[in-house]
Image (cartoon, grey):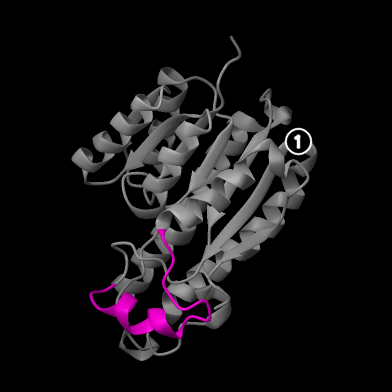
Amino acid sequence: MATAPVLLITGGSRGLGAATARLAARRGFDVAVNYRTDAQAAERVVADVQAAGRRAVAIQADVAQEHEVEKMFEKVDATLGRLTHFVYSSGITGPVSRVEDLSGADIRQVMDINVVGAFYCARAAIRRMSTKHGGAGGAIVLLSSIASVLGGGGEYVLYAASKGAIDSLTVGLAREVAGEGIRVNAVSPGLIDTEIQPPGRVERVGPTVPIGRAGKAEEVAEAIVFLLSEAASYVAGANLRVSGAR
C-alpha cells in the first residue's frame, strides 16, 4: 500500500483550515491539525479526518513563537512521518481601524502571526520537503487575501499589508525551491463567511461582491486542495483568487 501524503495545516481547527483538513482527508491525505487555543475544535476536525479513513493528529502551537513551530513540526515527524504538504492558514485581521489609531501591540501581533509565523513554518517545511535536504518534494499553499490588492482602507490596512507580504513570499519562495521538488502557491480568498468576520460584515458587504454573495469555506478549500494535488503539477508561484470577482 502506497504511503499517504502527509499534510500539516496551521490554523486547522477553524474556518478555512478546518474545511481544508476535511476535504484533504477525503482526497487521501493524512492530516496534522494545528491549533493555538481551541483543543476541542481541533479534536473535532481530527475525528472527521479519521472518519474519512485517514490518520490525523492535533498539535497545539503558537505559530508566532519560533520554538513552538519547531516542536510542532517535530511532532508531525514523530506521529505521521515526513512532511510532504503544508498549508499556512493561520491569520488574524487585527482591529477594524484607521492606521493612525493602531497601537504598536496591534501591529506587532498581526505581523507576528500573519508574516513572521509564515516564515518560521515555511523554513521548517522546506527543511523536510526539499530534495536538497533529502525530502521527496511536495507542495506548499500560503493563505493570502484579496485585501492585499484592495488595500483595506478605513478598516484593514494592517491586515492587507501583512497579506501583501505573503504575496511576495509566495513568488520568491516558489522560485527558490521549484528546482528542489516543492511547488509554492497562494490562495487569496475574498469575503468568506467564517468566524474571522466581525458581526454583520458578511450581511453588509456580501451583496456588494460582483458574484452577489459571500463565499463559503468549502469553496476556498477546493482551491487549496487543488494546488496541493498532482492536478496542479506545473502550477508554481501562482496566486489563485477565490473572491467572487471582488
Q: Quadrant of residue 52?
A: top left
Residue 230 at x, y percent in the picture = 69, 36
Residue at left offset 25%, top offset 34%: 43
The residue segment tinted magenta is 198-216
Looking at the image, which is closer to me, 129 or 68?
129
User: Badge 1: few (under 14), some or many (20 or more) residues near its Cα, within 10 Å?
Assistant: some
Task: Inspect the magenta stretch and tell me whether residue 82 lies in it.
Answer: no
Indicate whether 156 appears above or below 229: below
Find disc 1 in the rendering and name its residue: 180
Q: How many marks?
A: 1
Q: Position of residue 193 (x, y in %)?
A: 35, 65
- Residue 12 rendering spot, x and y as whole percentages: 37, 44
Residue drawn at x 54%, y 74% as measured from the top left: 148
Label 1 residue SS? helix
In the image, 203: left or right of 27? left
Q: Position of residue 122 (x, y in %)?
A: 56, 45
Q: As displayed, is residue 5 above or below residue 91?
A: above
Q: Is residue 209 left or right of residue 196?
A: right
Task: Please give left or right for residue 220 compared with residue 42 in the image.
Answer: right
Residue type highlighted by circle 1 = Glu
Kindly indicate the quadrant of the structure image that contains residue 92. bottom left
Could one spot residue 14 in this view of the protein? yes
Q: Residue at x 39, y 78 (%)?
A: 206
Q: Decide if residue 96 is in sight here.
A: no
Give the vertical position of 55 relative to 17 (above or below): above
Quadrant of image for the N terminus: top right
Hey, which residue is sitting farthest front in the picture? 212
